[in-house]
Amino acid sequence: MKLISVYTPSHRELKDRWFLPSFKDDYELCLHESNIEGDGTYMDSDWSRAVEFKSQTIIQALKDNLGDCFIY
């Protein structure tokens, strides 16, 4: 089964220092990095672009995994 996730440059350290070292499950890990920069303040333009990127990633995952299960 696939585990699909997205992250921004501001969260790269969390991915590298905490998430990846703690990942012990037998999932196919599919990470998507967005190049969106900003502080992520709710409803600011960088926040909106990040939400759009996440939505596009989910839609693509649904298309790519039609009939299969995945975790987002």
Image: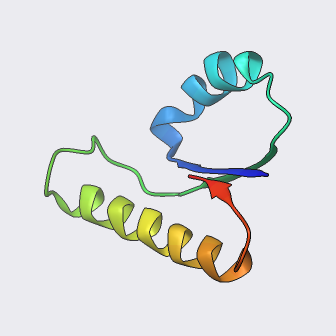
Q: Quadrant of residue 23?
A: top right
Query: In front: 50, or 64?
Result: 64
Give whichever of 38, 14 is nearer the camera. Answer: 14
Seen at 25% across and 64% down, the residue is 48
Q: Position of residue 38 (x, y in %)?
A: 32, 47
Across the whole image, how many numbered discs are drawn on residues? 0
| Colour scheme of the rendered structure | rainbow
Q: In terms of depth relative to the viewer, which is nearer, 26 or 11?
A: 26
Q: Is residue 17 left or right of residue 35?
A: right
Residue 19 appears left or right of 56: right
Question: Image height check: is 39 above or below 13?
Answer: below
Give the image quarter of residue 60.
bottom right
Q: Residue at x 65, y 83 (%)?
A: 63
Residue 10: horizontal and vertical position, in percent?
A: 46, 36
Residue 62 % position (x, y) = 60, 75
Name the spot of residue 52 as percent of width and height, x first.
Answer: 37, 70
Q: Is residue 23 above or below residue 54?
A: above
- As displayed, is residue 64 above or below residue 31? below
Residue 47 placement, left or right of 53: left
Q: Determine the residue positioned at 81% across, 42% down.
A: 27
The answer to whether residue 7 is left or right of residue 3 is left
Rendered position, 17 above or below 48: above
Image quadrant assignment for residue 22: top right
